[in-house]
Image: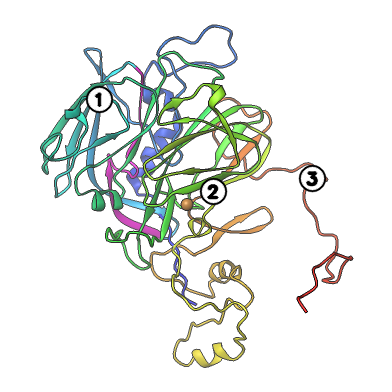
Amino acid sequence: MKLSRRNIMLSASAATLAKLAATDTASAAGPVATTTTGTSAAPRAGSYRPVRTPNGWTLPYTMRGGVKEFHLVAEEVEHEFGPGSKAKCWGYNGSTPGPTIEAVEGDRVRIMVTNRLREHTTVHWHGLLLPSGMDGVGGLNQPHIKPGETYAYEFTLRQHGTHMYHPHADEMTQMAFGMMGLFIIHPRVPDTPRVDRDYAILLHNWALHPGTYRPDPSIMTDFDVWTFNSKAFPAIESLVAATGERVRVRVGNLSMWNHPIHIHGPRFWITGGDGGRLPPSKWRSEVTEIVGVGQTRDFEFDAVAGDWAMHCHMSHHTMNAMGHDIPNTVGVDQSGVASKMNRILPNYMAMGQDGMAEHQSHFEMGHMPGPANTMPMMTGTGPHGNLEMGGMFTVIKVRDGLRPGDYSDPGWYPAPAGTVAQKVSSDPDFGTPVRRKPPA
Ligand SMILES: [Cu+2]
């Protein structure tokens, strides 16, 4: 059976940037970006708790005459989706997604955009309220930014919420190659309840066909790699929190599919998105929330101890490069097939007779070499065995007593005795389950 799954790899520059982001996002975001929770003093206007972009980073700014000045550079980047899958992508400042831009409602911002691509580009500030000439649609609102040129966008932030940026020039190609980023605007006056951990994730899909090294922009529906912040499981960082902390996960979608994002464990509420944080009377308790193409949604919950999966609920979106249009071998007697096939294909293995789960173990034991530069379809190992996941999947790790701001991976959850599902029999005829009779 043809297996194709993809991995993403980190380039050296992206790894350096990730390290920068992992040190202290508050310092990267500037001097106003500090608050403490648990104090009785009213939060200072303009202060905020910086977001954390898993596997990503936040763009520093410079204050010039009361304006926060950012500088984006559109360029080709060497990107790793996960172990064994690298590609030439396009992004900003050495990474895809580009760095997260973070500011406060009421700020005046200036964003320089330098084009180091070999074709023109622009940047559209998706969802932001701004003058028409700053909206970034090439040819409509402004001339295109030609290779080598730098344009300045300048506007005042008149809202708060979870927003995004992306090109509005040759969008099909430039977005397919990974040009996009998050634009987080905090409220001028911090509202309650304060969040203790504020994560931001951008969803994307990639037609990185098995054995290739550049995403295919011509694909409309049939993608190979599904990513959170341009990483596929198991390369996606875990989201870490202390028991009882208030956690927000902001999710934006600039892919070509809608993604039903599902969080296991705690009850979560949809508390806002591109419209900012809603009043609590508008919050919705959900188990799965579709984040549509071009939308953002904020998920909030009080952290409950454990290891909790967070993933897209489209089952093909939690796999890496997928072999499409392959024969269905489940239930097919394949005895003798491998020995016959081995005369023409020495590495052929007859698989899939009893289901697909065996793919991961065959691949990881090296029995079944996959195509070059391609992650296995299913991968990842947990404390109890193979996870058989990929793509848009990560784990929220909640532990008692973590220090505020400690984002280090705490390992697997040490479940208290008696709270783990356990084997009670190995006999298929065990017990007296009630079963429907087959139709006469
Ligand atoms: Cu999905």
Q: Secondary structure at mark 3?
A: loop
Vertical placement of residue 213 versus 409, above or below: below
Looking at this view, is 347 or 306 the one in front? 306
What percent of the width, then of the height, locates residue 222?
38, 62
- Element under disc 2: strand
Amino acid carrying label 1: it is Leu
> 2 or 77: nearer the eye?
2
Residue holding disc 3: 419
Image: magenta residue range: 85-105
For marks 1 and 2, give the CA distance: 34 Å
Give the vertical position of 152 relative to 256 (above or below).
above
Q: Is residue 385 left or right of residue 86?
A: right
User: The C terminus is located in which quarter?
Assistant: bottom right
What residue is drawn where x is 46% and y is 76%? 326
Q: Residues within 10 Å of mark 3 (few under 14, many from 20)?
A: few
Compared with 425, 40 (above or below) is above
Q: Which callout, 3 or 2, points to the residue nearer the camera? A: 2
Q: Is residue 278 above or below residue 113?
A: above
Q: Could you tell me how far apart the alpha carbons at marks 3 and 2 are, in whole angstroms? A: 23 Å
Q: Earlier in the sequence, mark 1 or mark 3?
A: 1
Is residue 196 among the parts visible in the rendering? no
Q: Position of residue 226 (x, y in %)?
A: 43, 54
* Residue 264 within the magenta-colored segment of the rendering: no
On residue 311, which mark appears?
Answer: 2
Q: Which residue is mark 1?
A: 130
The local secondary structure at tag 1 comes to loop
Pair 1/3: label in front: 1
Which numbered dot is residue 30? none
Establish whether ligand 1 lies closer than 8 Å to the Cβ of label 2.
Answer: no
In terms of sequence position, does the residue under pointer 3 or pointer 2 come before the other?
2
The answer to which image quadrant residue 345 occupies is: bottom left
